[in-house]
Image (cartoon, helix red, strand yellow):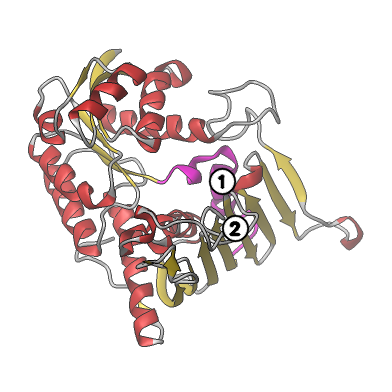
Amino acid sequence: MRQIGIGIIGGGYMGKAHAVAMASVGAAFDTALRPRLEMVAASSPESAARYARAFGFARAADTWEALVADRSVEAIVIASPQETHRAIAEAAFVEGKPVFCEKPLGATLDDARAMTRAAEASGLPNMVGFNYVRTPATQFARQLIAEGAIGRILWLRGEHTEDFYADPDAPASWRTAGEANGTMGDLAPHMINAALALGGPIASVMADIETVFPDRGGVPVTNDDQAQMMCRFASGAMGHLFFSRVAHGRKMGYAYEITGSRGAIRFDQEDQNALWLYRAEGPEATRGFVKILTGPEHPDYAAFCQGPGHGTGYQDQIIIEARDFLQAIETGKPVWPTFRDGLAVAEIIAAARAAQASRSWQDVTHMEGQT
């Protein structure tokens, strides 16, 4: 095994999660590459110094540019605001450094396309952080679908719903300003990524995007609170996706239901260690959804716990992401989801916005060279 110097840009919610993951991944998965928390950058030198002390980094950087250019930093994790992603990623690839970027890939479709071009031109490992799709239960759902356990997918319903802005009297913040910070920029990418992972490519969409509370404390809200999309998958399957930050009672409502020609699957992130499976077989009197509790027999579970039903949590998803990123660096082979997979999500969001504007179905347009 050998050490690899990690630089993380951003020390807030996700910056801390990635720092903890990099400090833990070697023990969890016995990785050949062992991360060394080399440097952290944040919105100010003072913040970076505070995060370095708190998270165990060797050094703090005054700017993200200094971190990217530092020779001891061998791989970059971007956990800063969306509008910074493109510049950081492009600079890192010029320096010859692999990049893991938090979702969404860029603040705009143009950003996402430019970042994908830069990543692929560099030939360097690149990944996007869609952590929820890495739970053992959802990995197992993907496995069941690939094996044909529920037959051909006919319909997929997905949602990512939370209630952190359900109170109409909640004050305005950075979350209520700018298109990239609305529900379509914040919550929708996770469930769109899940829909692609479970149902395959999406060919066309129809969308309705809404700002429910246009004013918060006298400050105009300039982005969306909720949105819904009808979609048609390239396979011919039908789909419906819903996203909301004003859904009372939903704390982590990342959920999906998939109907196939021979069965069905249901999942809810608020019960993330369980998957519900229906098989259309046997006597009708004994048919029904079976609750499967995840355990060591399911993907990536055993790295965290030897007891079935004991469960994994949010931080474990980030540790699995860290393992995947290190594997991509070690082997030089792409590990899903790459920047191009993040771009696919951005293209669907762009098509949804076009559908909202035109009040008509829109085909999803892919960047040239997409496979």
Q: Which residues are magenta?
A: 130-152
Q: Which mark is residue 309?
A: none
User: Residue visible at 66% across and 67% down?
Assistant: 261
Q: Write down the residue under mark 2.
A: 256
When asked about the image quadrant of residue 288, the answer is bottom right
User: Which residue: 32% across, 70% down?
Assistant: 350
Can you tell which of label 2 and label 1 is closer to the viewer? 2
Residue at 28% across, 54% down = 340
Task: Name which quarter of the figure residue 348 lies in.
Answer: bottom left
Q: Is residue 205 left or right of residue 370?
A: right
Name the spot of residue 317 as percent of width and height, x first. 48, 35
Q: Which numbered disc, 2 or 1, marks the residue that appears first in the sequence?
A: 1
> Could you say whether the residue bearing mark 2 is in a helix, strand or loop?
strand
Of 68 and 199, which appears nearest the observer?
A: 68
Q: Please say whether residue 31 is visible from this viewpoint.
A: no
Classify 64 as above or below 338: above
Seen at 91% across and 60% down, the residue is 285
Out of 288 and 129, give the one closest to the viewer. 129
The answer to which quarter of the image holds residue 320 is: top left
Q: Which residue was labeled with disc 1?
A: 138
Q: CA distance from mark 2 to mark 1?
A: 10 Å
Image quarter (top left, top right, bottom left or bottom right) of the N terminus: top left
Q: Nearer the viewer, residue 32 or 45?
A: 45
Residue 197 part of the magenta segment: no
Depicted 212 relative to depicted 254: above or below: below
**How many marks are shown on the rendered structure?**
2
The secondary structure that most of the magenta stretch takes on is: helix
